[in-house]
Image (tube, rainbow, N blue to C red):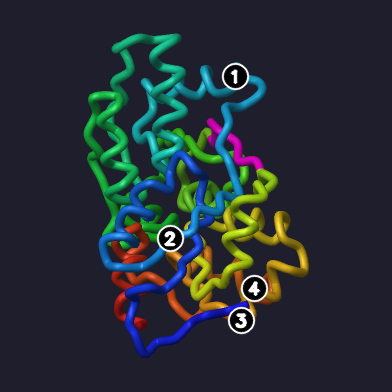
Amino acid sequence: MSRRSSGRGIVGQRIVVTRARNQSESLITALTQVGAIPISFPTIQHQQMRDLREVDAGIRAALDADWVVFTSANGVRAVADRVAITMEDRWRPQRIAAVGPVTASALGQLALVANLIPGEYHGGALAAALGKVSGLSIVLLRASAAQPTLANDLRSAGAEVLDVPVYRTEMIEPDQGALDELGQGVDVVTFTSSSTVHGFVSALGAGGRSLTDSAIVATIGPITTATAISLGMSVEVEATESTTDGLIQALVGHF
């Protein structure tokens, strides 16, 4: 059931937040500040890899690489957890590239600063921003579910890439309280990654498709939009800047 109405602006709009619970606070707070009613409906959770030997090997290899690349704040957190156990404060790569400002900010956990942040916050822009990489060694520290596009692009450009999954994403079952909230009416469903789209569909099945047919679907960027469309959703709002602030701005602008 949808209660959406563009006449009242974003104030009072019931907006579903599907990202992992430990990451949802900033989006929920921002929605509240603009007068929306956020509905916490986490569809995924992040876990460490079951076998950490490859993670630890990648962390060690990063010390000798020309570039270390992070594509999410979760990747930084996963590495920080392992560095705290295996290397203490001795982890100082030569150069670090972060896919966006949120990922770059997370590097503070390691007392590190990004040497490179692309102008647009996605893998394609990051590959382009790295410039000529032929002959360079690059360690890519990423989610296990991430698409291989960035690694493939860098290899095609002549780089030697060590592609290391450092955390995994799991879909979770919604609790009854969250389902009851959805039943009271939804105006917008937000997706902040492809994983949240898959998690939403997995959690609700046909009911999820019905919900996104009647509510506005809003995404954080083009990759998430492409995933939503591939699963039969119609995306009405896409953030120009792939950040929480960008998503809020896009929603406010829409209404």
168 sits left or right of 63 in the view: right
Q: Amino acid at mark 3?
A: Ser
3D distance between C-alphas at marks 2 and 4: 16 Å
3D distance between C-alphas at marks 2 and 1: 36 Å
Which of labels 2 and 1 is toward the front?
Answer: 2
Q: Earlier in the sequence, mark 3 or mark 2?
A: 2
Residue situated furthest right in the rendering: 206
Q: Earlier in the sequence, mark 1 or mark 4?
A: 1
The disc at residue 211 is 4
Q: Which residue is mark 2?
A: 38
3D distance between C-alphas at marks 3 and 2: 17 Å
Q: Secondary structure at mark 2?
A: strand
Q: Is the residue 172 above or below the residue 107 in the image?
A: below
Which of labels 1 and 3 is toward the front?
Answer: 3
Task: Please check the rendered image and state whether residue 30 is part of the magenta-colored stretch, yes or no.
Answer: no
Query: Mark 2 packing: few (<14 Cα in 10 Å), some, or many (20+)?
Result: many
Marks 4 & 3, CB-CB < 8 Å contact: yes
- Residue at the spot x=34%, y=49% of the render? 26
Query: Mark 3 packing: few (<14 Cα in 10 Å), some, or many (20+)?
Result: some
